[in-house]
Amino acid sequence: MSRRRRMTDIEFETICPLLNISEDSVRMARSVLVDGKSLRVVAAAEGCSFQFVDKNTQVVLKVFERYQEARRIAKADGVQIPPGWERVTVIAPTDVIEKFKEELAEHDKACLLPDA
């Protein structure tokens, strides 16, 4: 799984209460993920190894991924939504909705067919 190496300030601040790492580790991860500094630059400034900075960055990214998954599930109102899908409310003419339902049924059939 490819992990995104950047976060917005709001994303980072949202998950800070969920982090179980020191304030120094949070500051280092923020420097990499929000401010865009390299692991080596942060490590040199903090007087530690770049591996230590990377480890803390990975901890934050993992918490962020778990947070995003929890939000996706919460938005589904208890309905399991597959990755790559989303729930929307559509207001459209009945004939358009019927066509959409038919296309969705065809998509579902294609996904269920065994590989030949």
Image (tube, rainbow, N blue to C red):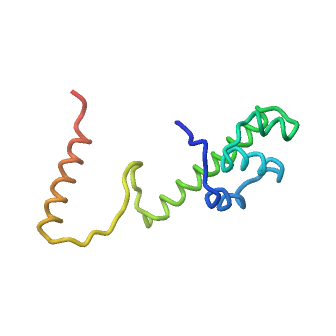
Q: Is residue 28 above or below residue 89?
A: above
The x and y percentages for residue 21 are 79, 50
* 82 sits left or right of 37 in the view: left
Which residue appears at 20% of the width and 45% of the height? 109
Residue sitting at the far top: 116
* 113 sits left or right of 52 in the view: left
The x and y percentages for residue 99 are 14, 60
Which residue appears at 17% of the width and 48% of the height? 106
The x and y percentages for residue 65 are 58, 49
The part of the image, by quadrant, that contains residue 4 is: top right
* 76 sits left or right of 41 in the view: left
Q: Nearer the viewer, residue 23 or 40?
A: 40
Q: Nearer the viewer, residue 43 or 96?
A: 43
The part of the image, by quadrant, that contains residue 55 is: top right
Q: Is residue 80 above or below residue 92?
A: above
Which residue appears at 49% of the width and 64% of the height? 74
Q: Is residue 52 above or below residue 13?
A: above
Residue sitting at the far right: 47
* 92 sits left or right of 21 in the view: left
Which residue appears at 76% of the width and 33% of the height? 40
The x and y percentages for residue 87 are 36, 62
Q: Which quadrant is the C terminus positioned in?
A: top left
Q: Nearer the viewer, residue 54 or 62?
A: 54
Q: Is residue 71 above or below residue 51?
A: below
